[in-house]
Image: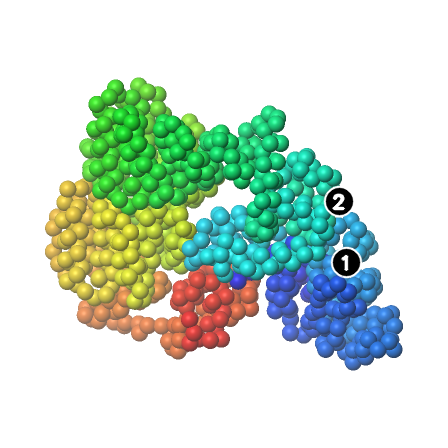
Amino acid sequence: MDLLEREAVLQDLTGHLKAAVSGPGRLALVRGEAGIGKTAVVHRLAQLADPHVRVVIGACDPLATPRPLGPLLDLAPRLGREARTALTGTLTGTSRSDEVYDCLLADLSAYPSLLVVEDIHWADQATMDLLRYLARRLPNVPALVLATYRDDEIGRTHGLTAFLGTLAGYPWVYRHDLAPLSREAVARLATGRTVDTEQLYRLSAGNPFIVAEILAAPAEPIPATVREAVAGRLAGLSGAARRVVDVLAVLGVRVPLPLLAGILPTPEEALDEAAACGIVRTHGQVTEFRHELTRLAVLEAVPAAYRLRVHRQVLAAMRSGPVAAEDLPLLADHADGAGDPAAVLEYAPAAAVRAAGLGAHREAAAQYARALRYADRLPPEQHISLLEGHSQACLLSSQLDVGIASCRTAVRLRRALGDRLREGDDLRRLSCWLWPAGQTAEARRTGLDAVRVLEELTPGRELARSYLNLCQLACYAHEGVAVVAAHAEKAIALGERSGDAGVLVQARFHAAAARLLSDGHGWEDCEQAVSDARARDLSLDTGFLTLVLCWLAALRRDAARSAAAVGRAETYCLDRGLPAYLLCARAWGSWGLLHRGLWPQAADVSEKVLSHPGSPPVARAMTLTVLGLLRARQGRPEGWPLLDQAASLVDPGCLLDTGLGWEARVEAAWLGGDQEQVQADGRRGLAALADRNHPWLSGPLACWIRRAGGEPPRVPAAGPYALELAGDWAGAAARWDGLGCPYDAALARLSGDAPALRQALSAFEALGARPAVARTRSVMRDRGVRPVRRGPRPATRANPYRLTNREMDVLKLLDEGLSDAEIAARLYISPKTAGHHVGAVLTKLDVHTRHEAARKLHHPGRG
């Protein structure tokens, strides 16, 4: 597993080592909880050490009776003869401890050294005395002594605490904390895996060991290694401490100490013992498990009858006094655990409403689902209200299939009740969410059904929202400015009457978006609508519109606006807990990265979207298309299966609406040399667009037909496409350059003169676009353009992965475990350039991680 977010501490430790071996010596303490990566940091430091530095590593063991000087026995083979003899004498009783200390000090004085003692929280008294002895004399020794320990397992009375106190006045002692991994780092480790990274982060709290074990056994709710590690820690607890831990596991997260004391009399001493073993921690008046997965592992072992009794005790205690809003989730949980349906139906819906109001949509969905298990006890109206709340929460937390199913059930039950107003509103909601599910034809039919139902009733907010839905669908389907504007006007008129600010900003936004897609004018109006939504604190509307801006920018190949829009959408949706919008925004971002020529980054973003189990079908289809097209551009054979998989996830109208499906497949056929398929699929795509008006969809298809030697029909074409179709390749290329799209600019230059062809060839080679390179060389030969460069340099051709000399340098440094910043320092380049080289290496080696790339350096024939 990659060593992430440890660059700073490794840089500090490397600096300590360099300074120490030149004198005076230093002591470094690396501390953190179990599994945080202390050993990994030590091993990486040993790899980074200069060859002339001797590295000796020993470790303390968790033995009931620790070995005297156990770490020294581990590292004895690397010590000098006198030190080894003295150490052997301690085992036979012929040497005193102080003789060993003196010999070790003399040995360290003779050789520049890195001396590591791991897990000193398990050290015996002799080892602790040795460390005291060395620490005091280090300024006279060319060595870095590095000690690691678990700071979550030492209390006030632990022997290590006293030792650390003696170091307080030594200026040559340095302390380094290893923090848990961030959400971003956990997501990076999960790249390529189908796992909910937010759930992974929640369960692991960023602990690298737990992250690795979950990823190694994704099908297991609790990996066996984690279960065994927890059991090992619990085994040493007294009966009272074990009861405290069991009760805390049942109570859940962040347990107030007064509540714990109400169930277990005088738990303080037992709680201190549990905290000392690293299972739980206390902050003020609250106690919690260090990791949610640890709590679940403990809870799994608690007998069911005991759990039931504790839940009932807690429920009774919490209901005996005033109920605060923040206690609603706990009350719902304990009501469920206590097997009390009436209490569940009292607290779970209220907890769900509160969670939704706070933007915690995943939690809201879970509370609604809990209440729905007992909904057969409720009157129909309340049952349907739960379904509607559950549907909305699921959809906003990227649980699309479950949310759509609840919405369908709500529609059916509303119809059975004869509640036409609510039925129409639920039909509108269903239509809204069928589009990201890739079911655009049904979304259109359902949206029209909603309007038909509501138009029979007194016009109000529900009808305004239904007109808005038709406005949105018409915009996404590129039905033209007039159609979108007609729906928008109806929505605005009713929105003003009902005071629905969300309807007003969204209708104006989509009317402007339709103009933007048709004639290129309206971006500023779209931006203004987003600003208005944000100013009015319309969080869901703002999140949705920031997503649609990503689509608009990517569809129009506007690299700068695409990057800005995706960055803004990511920030907003992360802050507001809108994963469905976030995943779609990132999917469109991958399309924008592809057009900007940032192919490794496009692949990385696409794979992250695909690895999220909650990615909507539209987002999955987008990213599969990006990956399929990218691989086709690189000349890799697996492009077509990905394009076919994308097409299977959504209906044909969705592929057409998004602008990905037809164009990607036509380009892939061109790259494969199938000119007949290019023309046939290009004309079929234009036929499907016959009743739509979108020059950014029809323009590229017409250009591909022309590039394949055909005569395309006259169709609306956006700026650079129109220029190319008119024979102005130079103007088209310049326009693409201005948009930040190097690959498209190179395609336009294929119709140009000799300098343009050479420029195109250089661009394709820089991108690694092998089929386009071959096509360009063929065009140059046919036109008699000389000289034609014959591909990569000899050194590159000789490399089995066609890496350049600089890329081979980077690969070797990856094998050393260096970060981008460290690679940059070694090669005297900028970190950004180093990152580009790393991306190119990963792409050429067809791997996802730096570790996999390094492995191919030693085993070039293996995958």
Residue that appears at 68% across and 49% down: 242
Report x, y in % for residue 544. 37, 37
Q: What residue type is labelled 2?
A: Glu
Q: How busy is the neighbourhood of tag 2: few (under 14 within 10 Å), some, or many (20 plus)?
A: few
In front of the other: 604 or 143: 604
Q: Would residue 529 appear left or right of 660 to someone viewing this image?
A: right
- In the displayed structure image, the side of residue 106 where residue 597 appears, left or right: left
Q: Which mark is residue 308?
A: none
Q: Residue at x 55, y 64 (%)?
A: 818
Seen as rendered, the residue at the extreme front is 305
> Residue 550 vs residue 72: left or right?
left
User: Position of 810 compared to 172: left or right?
Assistant: left
Image quarter for residue 447?
top left
The one nearer the camera, 31 or 857, is 31
Q: Where is residue 371 in the image (x, y as percent from the top left)?
A: 45, 35
Against 366, residue 767 (above or below) is below
Mark 1 or 2, nearer chain start = 1
Would residue 139 be seen by someone viewing this image from the given angle?
no
Mark 1 or mark 2, whichever is nearer to me: 2
Q: How many labels does the image show?
A: 2
Report x, y in % for residue 845: 41, 68
In what quadrant of the picture does the C terminus appear? bottom left
Cα distance between the residues tagged 1 and 2: 37 Å
Q: Mark 1 points at which residue?
A: 172
Find residue 269 and name its label.
Answer: 2
Local crowd at mark 1 within 10 Å, few (<14), some, or many (≥20)? some
Q: Where is residue 373 in the image (x, y as percent from the top left)?
A: 43, 38
Q: What residue type is labelled 1?
A: Trp
Q: Residue at x 35, y 47 (%)?
A: 616
Helix, strand or loop for disc 2: helix
User: Which structural element holds mark 1?
Assistant: loop
